[in-house]
Image (cartoon, rainbow, N blue to C red):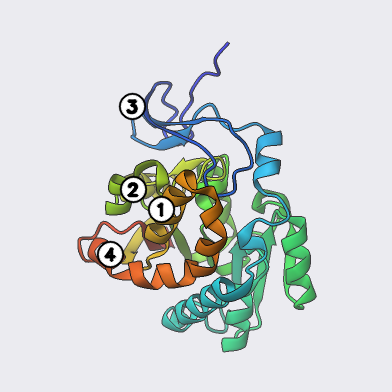
């Protein structure tokens, strides 16, 4: 019997098919995943959701955000340090900062290096959390809801490419609201399904990244989930980074000539740089595939 669709945002019980997806990035399974749109609030979800075994395989020990190897890792670290400098008024002392889904703690380490030692992280991946603790960072293994932080324990909460991974984004954001103080700030980075990249790249758009991305947001559905969890949307910044175009080219070529991926992996950072002008077009149109969101607790 097919699993009944229930939207985690509006509770709606019907959905329309959007696109069929495979795990083209990590190739952990040959299964097909169905992305559907809630007919009431338009939230995009994988339905039926991947089972536990599929998700465990999808987050294997070599999952890239948990390792950050080589030149790509150094580039990601540079982008995170730049983000910290630009957002420093929201991160500087005496603010207490929590990073949810902090992986190996790169962003926390950048905030600490900039001058704020009051940083904490939560990371469900045991290996990544252990690496973060080896860097002398206060990182708890598990999910935010399991950490049992006190009410109003933090001033700023970061979720960088986290919200799309969790089974119930509304529950996570409500917990985030509980542990943020009055006028606490929420910083989100996430893919934008209402983007040039999503429209043109289709099943090769890494923003879909099945089976790891369970929910894909647009600015409209993101605003709805923020308001439902007690936040007021402050700003959305459309970022110009060529990552999605580089990945799409790599996935398209790899599908046709599998042996070329060894070369493409080495060229990946260069492809990102070369594709950044394409991403800049989407950003100028307000339709970038990667967005940074700032919301304030009501």
User: Can you tell which of label 4 and label 3 is closer to the viewer?
Assistant: 4
Q: Quadrant of residue 93?
A: bottom right
- The spot of residue 191 in percent (x, y) is 41, 54
- The spot of residue 113 in percent (x, y) is 61, 87
Q: Quadrant of residue 105?
A: bottom right
- The spot of residue 197 in percent (x, y) is 32, 52
Q: Label 1's element?
A: helix
- Check disc 3 and report the residue beneath it: 39
Circle nearer the N terminus (1, 3): 3
- Check disc 1 and report the residue beneath it: 248
Front residue of 59/44: it is 59
Front residue of 287/200: it is 200
Alpha carbon distance from label 2 to label 3: 23 Å
Alpha carbon distance from label 2 to label 4: 12 Å
How crowded is the residue under tag 1: few (<14 C-alpha within 10 Å), some, or many (20+)?
many
- Check disc 4 and report the residue beneath it: 278
Q: On residue 271, which mark appears?
A: none
Q: Is residue 209 above or below residue 61?
A: above
């Amino acid at each position: 019997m097919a699993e009944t669709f229930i939207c985690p945002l509006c509770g709606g019980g019907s959905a329309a098919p959007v696109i069929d997806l495979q795990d083209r990035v990590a190739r952990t399974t040959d299964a097909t995943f169905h992305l559907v749109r809630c007919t009431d609030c338009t939230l995009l979800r994988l339905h039926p959701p991947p089972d536990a075994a599929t998700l465990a395989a999808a987050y294997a020990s070599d999952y890239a955000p948990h390792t950050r190897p080589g030149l790509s890792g150094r580039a990601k670290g540079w982008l995170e340090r730049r983000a910290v400098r630009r957002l420093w008024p929201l991160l500087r002392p005496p603010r207490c900062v929590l990073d949810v889904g902090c992986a190996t703690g790169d962003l926390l380490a950048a905030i600490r290096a900039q001058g704020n030692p009051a940083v904490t992280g939560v990371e469900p991946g045991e290996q990544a959390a252990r690496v973060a603790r080896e860097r002398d960072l206060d990182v708890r293994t598990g999910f935010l809801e399991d950490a049992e932080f006190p009410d109003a324990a933090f001033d700023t909460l970061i979720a960088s490419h986290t919200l799309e991974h969790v089974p119930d984004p509304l529950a996570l954001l409500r917990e985030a609201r509980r542990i943020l103080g009055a006028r606490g700030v929420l910083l989100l980075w996430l893919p934008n399904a209402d983007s040039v990249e999503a429209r043109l790249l289709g099943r090769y758009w890494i923003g879909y990244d099945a089976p790891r991305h369970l929910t894909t947001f647009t600015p409209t559905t993101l605003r709805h989930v923020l308001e439902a969890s007690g936040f007021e949307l402050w700003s959305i910044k459309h970022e110009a980074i060529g990552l999605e175009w580089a990945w799409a080219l790599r996935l398209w070529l790899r599908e046709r000539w599998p042996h070329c991926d060894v070369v493409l992996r080495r060229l990946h950072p260069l492809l990102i740089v070369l594709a950044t002008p394409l991403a800049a077009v989407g950003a100028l149109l307000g339709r970038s595939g990667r967005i940074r969101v700032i919301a304030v607790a009501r």
